[in-house]
Image (cartoon, rainbow, N blue to C red):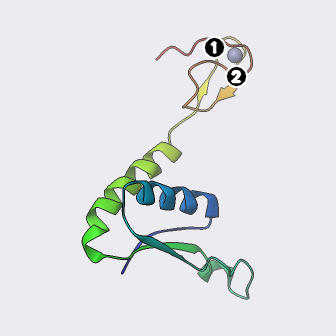
């Protein structure tokens, strides 16, 4: 088994797990039920692949996730609201985002 991904944000780890499962890679989570403890920094949810041979493919899939999650927001030129990078129009005033 190989540790592929760990994050303090359980939602992100579960998202990564879903991506790998959808790609047909057997995975498991560790520390899933240790949300409280004396040393919370050691309790990050961990995503492991069952087969070492899946490591490269898994890391490649997860790297896409990391890129997406850190993509920058954009500011609407009309109302100056912040929009998520995945939005094509401003959520506030519906102004179309100029790529
Ligand atoms: Zn706007």
* Residue 67, disc: none
Q: Residue at x 43, y 46 (%)?
A: 67
Residue under circle 2?
91
- Nearer-the-camera pick, 42 or 22: 22
Ligand 1's image quarter is top right
Which residue is found at the position 29% from the left and 68% from the top?
54
Q: Quadrant of residue 23?
A: bottom left
- Callout 2: CB less than 8 Å from ligand 1: yes
Query: Mark 1 CB in 8 Å range of ligand 1?
Result: yes
Q: Is 69 located above or below residue 12 in the figure? A: above
Q: Quadrant of residue 2?
A: bottom left
Would you call the spot at circle 1 few (<14 residues within 10 Å), some (14-19), or many (20 or more)?
A: few
Secondary structure of the residue carrying tag 1 is loop
> Residue 33, percent across and down?
68, 80
Which residue is pictured at 44% across the width and 60% down the height?
21
Which percent across, then down, holds residue 98?
51, 13
Q: Residue at x 71, y 23 (%)?
A: 81
Residue 20 placement: quadrant: bottom left
Q: Nearer the viewer, mark 1 or mark 2?
A: 2
Query: Is 10 left, or right, of 59 in this rendering?
Result: right
């Amino acid at each position: 088994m190989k540790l592929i991904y760990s994050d303090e944000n359980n939602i992100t780890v579960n998202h990564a797990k879903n991506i790998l499962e959808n790609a047909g890679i057997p995975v498991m989570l560790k520390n899933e039920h240790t949300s409280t403890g004396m040393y919370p920094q050691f309790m990050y949810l961990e995503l492991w692949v069952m087969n070492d041979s899946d490591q490269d493919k898994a890391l490649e899939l997860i790297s896409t996730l990391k890129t997406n999650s850190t993509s920058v927001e954009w500011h609407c030129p009309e109302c100056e609201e912040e929009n998520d990078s995945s939005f094509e129009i401003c959520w506030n005033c519906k102004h179309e985002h100029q790529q």
